[in-house]
Image (cartoon, grey):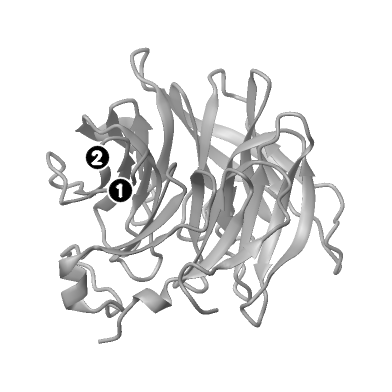
């Protein structure tokens, strides 16, 4: 796969869409799940695989989903399991699904609903899997509460272990689970970012005056996370010194909506915005953890953290996802249903 702004396009999504997720648990293929957001049509989940040649995106499975998909996450330890948050009119819900055996057919049978997360009385916003392997806990976030669940997918059982309200004056919209600490989660809340300790279900830390759209932990450096913010673009934080950000990047011309750290190279960051652009950044953060050798030429990195802007889109970018299997490849999803897979390799100068 060559080139910068000439990515591989998947044309299978017929409806508007916001959600795309890397299938981390598939060790043999570069695979993504994407879900649609149609008000009037029956929605779909697409299992999209990069061909062995690396020049084509293939639909490995097309599954009907009953409602508009607002959040979709692939299970980190089972490639056939994923979660969705969905809405039907004024009703919000969340479920864990299992992809049926495909037997070589792309138009597969109905998705199997393993678990429905029915304890929410507020609008549910996000499901979080602990990202570093098999873990029988799940977090769900609604506008007013954090829920910690115990999940047994084989028995189709979900039990609430603990729940905590953020209070009447706050409004949650999403979050991220710390890959270095299964007891820590960052929750997006109005004009702050709240860090919660799941053992006590209490706030351990708060970053104030941060109008956050998205948050992502650095998988290689402990205590480091990135936020996508309306006014400030992208900020990098050290949670041990959270009064001021470590770094600030200009973000996008319009709202910066999504931010993702690379799973292997800690200095590479993707961002997506409502200016129909995906930006590739290179930012060095000093830390205690050892990381792979940088793929980016040092003088260029210091001169300009923006390595490239991908502009092959006609609509807002709400979904971006690195490939865990091939960490120099990412997929992006624009609101009009356009999935593009790109390689960042052309923009990484060799030392």
Identify the residue under disc 1: 251
User: Where residue 113 sits in the image (x, y, percent)?
Assistant: 75, 42
- In the rendered structure, the answer to whether residue 325 lies left or right of residue 118 reads left
Q: Position of residue 273 (x, y in %)?
A: 42, 45
Residue at horizontal 49%, vertical 57%? 321
Q: Is residue 299 above or below residue 88?
A: below
Q: Where is residue 248 drawn, in percent x and y? A: 19, 49
Sequence-wise, the earlier of marks 1 and 2 is 2
In this figure, which residue is indicated by the disc labeled 2?
Answer: 232
Q: Nearer the viewer, residue 104 or 257?
A: 257
Query: What's the CA distance linking mark 1 and mark 2?
Result: 7 Å
Quadrant occupied by the N terminus: bottom right
- Picture residue at 74% right of the left edge, 45% below the top: 44
Residue at image position (78%, 54%) is: 62
Q: Do the residues under discs 1 and 2 have CB atoms within 8 angstroms?
A: yes
Q: Secondary structure at mark 2?
A: loop
Above or below, 118 against 235 in this view is: above
**In the figure, 208 relative to 333: above or below?**
above
The percent coordinates of residue 91 (x first, y second) are 65, 20
Residue in the image at 87% along x and 52% along y? 109
């Amino acid at each position: 796969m060559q080139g910068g702004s000439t990515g591989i396009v998947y044309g299978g999504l017929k409806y508007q869409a916001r959600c795309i997720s890397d299938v981390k648990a598939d060790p043999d293929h570069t695979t993504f799940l994407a879900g649609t957001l149609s008000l009037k049509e029956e929605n779909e989940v697409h299992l999209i695989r990069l061909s062995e040649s690396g020049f084509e995106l293939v639909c490995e499975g097309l599954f009907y989903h009953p409602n508009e998909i607002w959040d979709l996450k692939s299970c980190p330890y089972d490639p056939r399991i994923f979660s969705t948050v969905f809405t039907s009119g004024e009703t919000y819900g969340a479920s864990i699904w299992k992809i049926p055996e495909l037997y070589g057919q792309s138009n597969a049978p109905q998705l199997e609903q393993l678990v429905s997360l029915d304890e929410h009385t507020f609008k549910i916003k996000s499901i979080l899997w602990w990202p570093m392997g098999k873990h029988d806990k799940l977090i769900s976030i609604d506008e007013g509460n954090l829920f910690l669940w115990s999940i047994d997918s084989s028995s189709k059982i979900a039990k609430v272990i603990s729940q905590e309200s953020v209070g009447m004056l706050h409004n949650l919209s999403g979050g991220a689970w710390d890959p270095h600490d299964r007891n820590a989660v960052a929750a997006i809340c109005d004009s702050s970012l709240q860090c919660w300790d799941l053992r006590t279900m209490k706030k351990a830390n708060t970053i104030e005056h941060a109008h956050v759209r998205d948050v992502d932990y650095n998988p290689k450096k402990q205590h480091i996370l990135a936020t996508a913010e309306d006014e400030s673009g992208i900020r990098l934080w050290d949670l041990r010194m959270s009064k001021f950000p470590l770094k600030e990047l200009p973000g996008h011309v319009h709202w910066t909506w999504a931010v993702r750290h690379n799973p292997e190279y800690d200095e590479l960051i993707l961002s997506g915005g409502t200016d129909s652009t995906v930006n590739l950044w290179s930012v060095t953060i000093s830390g205690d953890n050892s990381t792979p050798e940088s793929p980016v030429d040092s003088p260029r990195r210091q001169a300009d953290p923006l390595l490239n802007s991908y502009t092959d889109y006609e609509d807002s970018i709400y979904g971006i996802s690195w490939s865990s299997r091939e960490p120099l490849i990412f997929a992006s999803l624009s609101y009009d249903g356009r999935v593009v897979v790109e390689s960042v390799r052309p923009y990484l100068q060799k030392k």
